[in-house]
Image (cartoon, grey):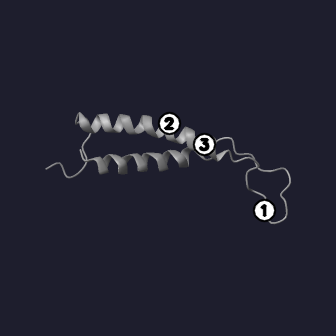
Amino acid sequence: MKWYFDVALYVICWWLTLFVVLPWGVKPANEAEQGHDPGAPARPDLWKKALVTTLVAVVVWLILHWALVWELAHLGSGT
C-alpha cells in the first residue's frame, strides 16, 4: 500500500470523526451578544474536540489499515 493512500485514508477518517464529535456537549449561550448568532455554542471547546477527533481517527485508521493489509477488505474493482 502506498504512503499517500494511507495519508488520504487518515484524512478521510479524521474529517468523518470530526463531524461526529462536533455536536458533543454543545449548549447554546444564555444570552446572545449583539452581532452573534443566538444558536452559537457558549463554549465550543474546539481544541478538546480536535484532540478527541485525532485519537479516535487514529484508532479507526489503524483498524482499516490492518484490514486492508491483511486483505480482510478490498478496495477497487477486485481484478
10 Å crowding of disc 2: few (<14), some (14-19), many (20+): some
Q: Amino acid at mark 3?
A: Lys
Real-space CA distance between mark 1 and mark 3, rounded to the nearest whole angstrom: 22 Å
Circle on res. 36: 1
Q: Residue at x 23, y 33 (%)?
A: 70
Circle on res. 49: 3
Instruction: Note whether 18 is above or below 60 in the view shown.
Output: below
Q: In this rendering, would 29 be left or right of 75? A: right
* SS label for mark 3: helix
Circle on res. 55: 2
Precedes in sequence: disc 1 or disc 2 = 1
Q: In this rendering, would 30 be left or right of 63? A: right
Q: Residue at x 25, y 47 (%)?
A: 2
Q: In this rendering, would 6 be left or right of 45? A: left
Q: In front: mark 1 or mark 2?
A: 2
Circle on res. 78: none
